[in-house]
Each structure stands twice: as C-alpha cells, then as structure tokens.
Amino acid sequence: MVNPFDSITEFIFVETAVSLADVILVPGANHPPLMEKAADLYKQGLAPYVLPSGGYKAHVGMTEWEYLRNLAMENGIPEEAILKEDKAQHTLENARFSLEVLHSNNIVPRKVIVVCKAGHARRSLLCYQAVFPKDCEFLISPCVDRYGITKDNWFLTEVGIKRVMDEVKKIGTYFSEILPSWNNNIHQLKEKGGNKT
C-alpha cells in the first residue's frame, strides 16, 4: 500500500474484463458516455439487449430511461434491443426494477454487464448483487464521469474526494439495512449444507 487511502480506491473503483452476457445494464444518469460505452459493447456482440434504467428527474426534464434510450439509438442500438425501465429513483431501484423487466421479457440473467460511472461502480455492483439471483455473474465496465474522476486521481481534487467519500457514505446507508438479510441467507445455506451430511 503506497497511500493510506488505497483501500478506498480498491473498494470503490471496480472494473472487470467483459465477455458474452445476457444483457447490458445501465443504471440511470444523464451522462452520455454511459450509453456510448454500452453501445460499443452491444456493437461488439457482447449482449443481445441493453437495459437503461431510471425514472423522471426534474434536472433531466424526462425520465433517465428516455434520455439514455435516445442516446442508445443515436449510437446505433436498434430500438428493439432496448428494454424499458422508467420508474427507478435510485441505484437499488435500478437493480430491483431491472430484474422485474428481465423477468417480464423471459430473460434469465446468468451473466450481465453493468455499465456505470467509475466512482459509482462498487455501489452499482452491490445493489445488483443484492437483488439478482445469487448465481448471476457480474461484469463491470465503468466510464469516467463528467468530473474526470478516476481511481488514479480522485484524491487530488476537492470534488473527487467529496464524490468518492459520498459513495462510501451511501454504501454504508444502503447496506446497513440489507446486510442482516444477507447474513440470514448465508446461515440458511450453511444449515442446508449441514443437513446433507
């Protein structure tokens, strides 16, 4: 560890290799690079569907889904490949409502690509992991946000520090309520495993 905050960098900034998946998920935001990256992955043939997610936001003037859908089409994704989730108001709802959309389209998510802002990667991953089937594999393909925040520079500016530490706080707020249910699930799985022997 070179810097005392390297552990925060490793925690918040998640990125994996990508491969063939069932769907590309895009948690809502009015940030064009998200859909540019999703379109690039779609055009590489990495998934047959793209699912932007996000409800109405006053600062966007429309739903985040509509904003991202328009960008998707501008970037060459055919309308029939774009699934619709236009109710979510935060990342956990992005995950919950996206899973409902997949189920309603008879799509079983075994492997998904999540395209999100780099500083939002850990919270996005945890939210989808909290909701999606436990055996679903998540591939994380982040893009740089409008502030230019990356794992290499977030600690160098006031806005970078604020936004990354806000993510740390939000993760604490979201998952302090969810963790007990995860513990119950782990306990139940251990009990089932114990009963087999």
Image (tube, helix red, strand yellow):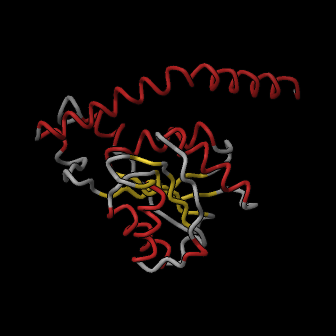
Q: Nearer the viewer, residue 105 or 60?
A: 60
Q: Residue furthest left?
A: 157
Q: Is residue 22 above or below residue 91?
A: below
- In the shown orientation, is residue 67 left or right of residue 93? left
The residue drawn where x is 17% and y is 34% is 3
The residue drawn where x is 67% and y is 42% is 134
Q: Nearer the viewer, residue 81 or 20?
A: 81
Measured from the top left, where is residue 122 in percent x and y?
41, 41
Measured from the top left, where is residue 18 in percent x and y?
48, 64
Q: Quadrant of the N terminus?
A: top left
- In the shown orientation, is residue 165 left or right of residue 106? left
**In which quadrant of the rendered view does residue 164 lie?**
top left
Q: Is residue 81 above or below residue 148?
A: below
Q: Is residue 161 above or below residue 113?
A: above
Measured from the top left, where is residue 103 in percent x and y?
73, 54
- In the shown orientation, is residue 43 left or right of residue 191? left
Q: Residue furthest right?
A: 196
Measured from the top left, where is residue 159 in percent x and y?
16, 39
**In which quadrant of the rendered view does residue 120 lie?**
top left
**In which quadrant of the rendered view does residue 93 lie?**
top right
Q: Quadrant of the C terminus?
A: top right
Q: Is residue 5 above or below residue 177?
A: below
